[in-house]
Image (tube, grey):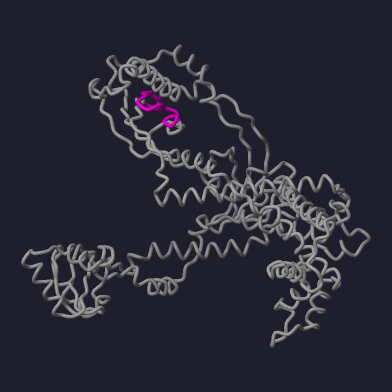
């Protein structure tokens, strides 16, 4: 057994000492009664406290991921509780199997593992029996229970390793995947638009537009909406009412002096030499036009990026500052002493000095400081507003009694204006139900809000009269593409083979080295995939939003197996394939164990744990 296994078990134990204080969660109450497990796998119990701890960890992780307190109902809807239970079932199934097979690390190995746990050691590294007993006492585990958990963890690790190790993928598998991923295509593309049509598209009649609207009703359907009422307070709403102290503004201006008052800076390249004689010799060669500055850099084994100092001030250049700042843009000066020794400097540009007075900076400073103070004002109100909601206040009453503003929105995934642009609001708007009571949540800019779901409106076609202009635009676009498609249908057969696009007045561009994962700008969805389905020399057409593409496949390049990057990719593909297959084998084995051992769940115990999260 590895030290990591025992340490991991110990971490669970020590964390349990903190988890007992989960703010009223009541793990002790759960363990103090007659019920000790939420189920069994064979003869192995799934400990009720272990399930509760794992569920709490997942809830905490979900809170951190979403940036808000997620309700247990939302977590259940996302399958969090089922995921935790399934993992524990799989773990206990493995424990039951190792017991059946007689796999164990033995007493001597167990002793060695205990002696290696640092938390159970004295300062001199010897085993501290008192520390061992105290830690177990605090977690309410007996020595037998703790040592049994280490044995089970070690045995489970051994069994898992035996199942997943030794899986090797056939190289044919790697070759097939490598060719699929690494094969390249070179194509030439001609783009057609309305300008190439011999006869322009005429204006649509009312009947044309109505027929197009009916035939393409999905384009003009308003998506399903959630009618949401919200109360909202953002720092921007309070900026005008927040008092900002003049002294604080001056302090902030002083603190950010470097931002508002910047000295002149120059874009400089520096090539340093070991001594002045070498630098002067290089300068002479430059003056005589024997070499360029770039050649001097390359001859030193450097790249231009190595000598680029970016934008610097005279103070940052030290002794070289006066000479560099006296030179004109585009010139080369030196050699002069620098912090790297004698150096030549090339001046590539000038960034003029910038000076912003306190009066000129005042509007920006006032807005920033007011916004910061507004955020603090809102933060101080969150608790009081939440108390109002808890006491039964409606959002309308909240808007009357506080500075929060009331609003409504027909929300769907495509809405991003106003409060709908905040990710926290969007996440909650997507899952809130009519049964949920409003509660305060915070926004990324320091604002706060609460919302209520009033109704849900199914998707429905927009009235023709309201979208007539959109219908006319879409009809004209479709008509242009249809006319271009007729033209392409006649051209494509004539272009196959080696016929030049220019012979038919088409201007083509070449797109080389295209991978399946590649991208070609201004092409329809699935375009690259369609290219990889073409035969060499074949010509096809593809409609875009406003025109048409004519495409010919002119080259297919397979990966070179002898290239280092290809062989490395092949090894990576085989490793990933082996890892995936190993995981599949392990999951199938674990499911089979569960079937053979039998799984029994204690639903009342599960409900009791879940009730603590409500």
In the current view of this chain or complex, which residue is farthest to the left? 288
Q: Residue at x 71, y 66 (%)?
A: 5
Q: Decide: is 241 above or below 394.
A: below
Quadrant of residue 487 within the rendered picture: top left
Quadrant of the drawing holding the N terminus? bottom right
Q: Decide: is 512 above or below 299.
A: above
Of residues 211 and 468, which is closer to you in this image? 211
Q: Does residue 85 appear left or right of residue 513 in this picture? A: right
Q: Position of residue 609 (x, y in %)?
A: 83, 55
Residue 531 painted magenta: yes
Quadrant of residue 150 within the rendered picture: bottom right
Quadrant of residue 288 within the rendered picture: bottom left
Q: Residue at x 67, y 41 (%)?
A: 453
Q: Does residue 304 appear left or right of residue 466 in this picture? A: left
How many labels sit on residues? 0
Q: Position of residue 105 (x, y in %)?
A: 78, 67
In this view of the protein, can residue 235 be seen by the observer?
yes
- Start-end of magenta stretch: 530-546
Q: Does residue 460 appear left or right of residue 505 in this picture? A: right
In the current view of this chain or complex, which residue is farthest to the bottom? 124
């Amino acid at each position: 057994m590895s030290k990591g296994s025992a340490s991991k078990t110990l971490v669970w134990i020590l964390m349990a000492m903190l988890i007992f204080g989960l703010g009223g969660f009541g793990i002790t109450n759960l363990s103090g009664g007659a019920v000790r497990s939420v189920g069994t796998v064979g003869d192995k119990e799934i400990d009720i406290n272990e399930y509760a701890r794992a569920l709490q960890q997942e809830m905490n992780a979900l809170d951190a991921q979403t940036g808000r307190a997620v309700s247990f109902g939302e977590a259940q809807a996302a399958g969090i509780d089922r995921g935790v239970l399934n993992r524990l079932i799989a773990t206990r199934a493995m424990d039951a199997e190792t017991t059946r097979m007689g796999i164990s690390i033995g007493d001597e190995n167990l002793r060695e593992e205990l002696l290696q746990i640092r938390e159970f050691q004295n300062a001199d590294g010897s085993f501290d029996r008192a520390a061992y007993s105290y830690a177990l006492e605090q977690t309410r585990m007996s020595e037998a229970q703790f040592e049994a958990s280490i044995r089970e963890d070690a045995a489970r690790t051994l069994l898992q390793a035996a199942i997943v190790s030794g899986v090797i993928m056939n190289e044919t598998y790697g070759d097939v995947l490598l060719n699929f991923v690494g094969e390249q295509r070179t194509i030439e593309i001609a783009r057609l638009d309305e300008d190439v049509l011999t006869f322009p598209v005429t204006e649509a009649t009312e009947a044309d537009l109505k027929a197009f609207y009916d035939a393409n009703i999905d384009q003009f359907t308003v998506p399903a909406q959630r009618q949401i009422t919200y109360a909202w307070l953002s720092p921007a709403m309070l900026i005008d009412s927040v008092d900002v102290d003049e002294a604080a503004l001056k302090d902030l201006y002083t603190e950010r002096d470097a931002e508002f008052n910047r000295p002149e800076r120059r874009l400089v390249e520096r090539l340093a030499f070991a001594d002045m004689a070498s630098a002067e010799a290089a300068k002479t060669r430059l003056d005589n036009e024997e070499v360029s500055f770039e050649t001097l850099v390359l001859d030193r084994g450097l790249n231009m990026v190595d000598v680029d100092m970016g934008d610097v001030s005279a103070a940052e250049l030290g002794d070289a500052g006066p000479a560099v700042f006296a030179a004109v843009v585009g010139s080369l000066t030196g050699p002069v002493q620098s912090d790297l020794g004698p150096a030549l400097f090339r001046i590539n540009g000038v960034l003029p000095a910038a000076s912003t007075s306190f009066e000129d900076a005042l509007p920006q400073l006032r807005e920033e400081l007011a916004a910061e103070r507004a955020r603090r004002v809102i933060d101080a109100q969150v608790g009081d507003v939440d108390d109002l909601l808890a006491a039964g206040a409606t959002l309308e009453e909240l808007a009357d009694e506080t500075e929060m503003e009331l609003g409504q929105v027909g929300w769907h995934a495509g809405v991003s204006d106003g409060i709908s642009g905040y990710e926290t609001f969007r996440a909650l708007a997507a899952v809130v139900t009519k049964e949920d009571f409003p509660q305060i949540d915070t926004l990324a800019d320091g604002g706060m809000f609460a919302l209520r779901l009033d109704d849900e409106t199914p998707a429905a076609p927009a009235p023709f009269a309201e979208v007539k202009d959109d219908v006319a635009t879409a009809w004209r676009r479709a008509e242009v593409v249809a006319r271009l498609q007729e033209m392409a249908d006649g051209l494509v057969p004539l272009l196959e083979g080696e016929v030049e696009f220019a012979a038919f007045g088409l201007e083509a561009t070449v797109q080389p080295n295209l991978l399946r994962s590649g991208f070609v700008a201004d092409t329809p969805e699935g375009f690259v995939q369609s290219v990889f389905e073409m035969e060499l020399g074949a010509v096809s057409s593809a409609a875009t939003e406003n025109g048409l593409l004519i495409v010919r496949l002119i080259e297919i390049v397979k990966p070179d197996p002898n290239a280092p990057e290809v062989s490395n990719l092949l090894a990576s593909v085989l490793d990933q394939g082996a890892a995936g297959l190993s995981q599949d084998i392990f999951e199938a084995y674990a499911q089979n164990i569960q079937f053979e051992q039998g799984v029994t769940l204690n639903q009342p115990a599960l409900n009791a744990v879940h009730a603590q999260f409500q």
